Amino acid sequence: MNKVLAAMAFSLTVALAAAPAGAQRSAGQPIDRVVAVVNQDAITARELEGRVAIAEKQLREQGRPPIPQDALMRQVLEQMILARAQSQYAKEVGVKPSEADVDRAVADVAQQNGISVQQLREQLAQQGVALATFREQIAGEIINLRLREREAVSKVTISEAEVDAQVSKRGGVASTEYEIAQILLRLPADPDARALQDKTALAEQIAKRASSGADFADLAREYSEAPEALKGGSLGWRTSDRLPELFVNAVAKLQAGQVGPVVRSPAGLHVLKLVDRRSEAPQASNVNRTRVRHILLTATSPAAEDEARRRLIEFKRTIQSGAGSFESIARQFSADGSAPKGGNLGWVFPGETVPDFERAMRDLPVGGMSDPVKTPFGMHLIEVLERRAAETSPEQIRAAARQALREQKADEAFEQWLREIRDRAYVEYRLEQP
């Protein structure tokens, strides 16, 4: 079982557990009222209240002002509807983790947090989180990953001509990275004229507010229907070949901090902000390859990120004092597939890791150990073991280009598939009903 997946589920559960008890079951409020029906499956007020409590806690941790309750509730409900439709499809096609899969994930969660499975159960009980709910969240993450592999990754095809174009585009040219934030307003596959007009007017109004100085992150939390909405819409740092071409073209002429015109994709309408851009020097044919190891702790919220940073600092002190070895700590706590190897990633060429990891690794001397480094995967403690000069072979250059194209296409294909699943679902809203 993927330990990253297990840690993500655990972080989500901790967020729910830490939310005020009243947010999950408010006195005098109905807890079993149906607020939406997805095909023949009901979403209850109690389920919605629990998810809203998670979102509210994330906002508080980020120091953000609260979103109006009705807007936040609608946004969270839409996310739940999409997740429910996705889960129903998974059941239809037989994508379901076994009890053993979930058991292994629970054991991984306990191990990463330095406790036994029984202690984990006791902590969940103390926080008022049912073990069944916890296991359901883990199962949902497993289903999401398997569906992405089935419906997107496995169906992506990359032609040799596309690889040729990618290699030509990158060769000898400085690589540009973008930090983009987005607000997505979803549209059905074939929207009627009125729906398109209304959504376009709303998108343009949001873009105007953002351009006039309104906080983009707050607008994203209130309006965006994208998965990263509650994180302020940020997509993080990505090179141009790991972004939709539509996005790159939309922000190419913007200055950092500017908001572009509304653009439309198969997923819907996008309001895009160029947070920042930076360039990397082009790679020479003779480069340094690095033998490196790391310890990864996943972090899906600011609170989890702070806790991961604190633990990695403690690990570094333990290693430097000689009280423990990097290898043994990585084996016990790292949430990466390299954990059984003591965190060893082997020999790494430039371009084979995400930009923030590569930058930190490149700046370390041989034998050096980093402070905690943040990447899209979580928080890392990195140690450089050895460096050697090596020539990047044409095969490696083409392999890196092919992988970048595959990731880009898979992201777009999975987003398109999710939209189709949502469009096909029969949804009845009952949120406003007493």
Image (tube, helix red, strand yellow):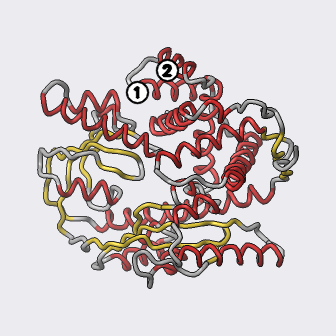
Q: Does dot 1 land on a helix, a strand or a loop?
A: loop
Q: Position of residue 169 (x, y in %)?
A: 38, 79
Q: Is residue 399 left or right of residue 34?
A: left
Asked which secondary structure carries label 2, the reply is: helix
Q: Residue at x 63, y 23 (%)?
A: 130
Task: From the viewer's perspective, tell me whether residue 296 is left or right of residue 316.
Answer: right
**What amino acid is labelled 2 in the image?**
Leu
- Between 233 and 5, the one lying in front of the other is 233
Question: In the figure, residue 358 lies in which quadrant?
Answer: bottom left
Depicted 344 relative to depicted 400: above or below: above
Query: Compared to 364, does 307 lie above or below?
Result: above
Query: On the rendered structure, is 84 left or right of 34?
Result: left
What residue is shown at x 31% (from left), y 77% (from top)? Answer: 171
Q: Find the distance from the CA under tag 2 to the CA under tag 1.
A: 9 Å
**Is the residue marked by circle 2 packed among few (<14), some (14-19), or many (20+) residues within 10 Å?**
many
Q: Say whether marks 2 and 1 touch (CB < 8 Å).
A: yes
Residue 312, quarter of picture: top left
| Residue 188: percent from left, percent from top | 76, 66
Q: Quadrant of the C terminus?
A: top right
Mark 1 residue type:
Asn
415 or 407, which lies in front?
A: 415
Point 61% across, 45% down: residue: 144
Q: Residues within 10 Å of mark 1 (few under 14, many from 20)?
A: some
Disc tally is 2
Which residue in the rendered view is the most extreme toward the bottom?
253
Q: Which residue is mark 2?
A: 120
Q: Residue at x 40, y 29 (%)?
A: 112
Residue 315, above or below 252 = above
Q: What percent of the width, then of the height, locates residue 384?
A: 18, 47
Q: Picture coordinates of residue 271 (x, y %)?
A: 58, 73
Residue 16 versus residue 93: which sits nearer the camera?
16
Q: Which residue is mark 1?
A: 113
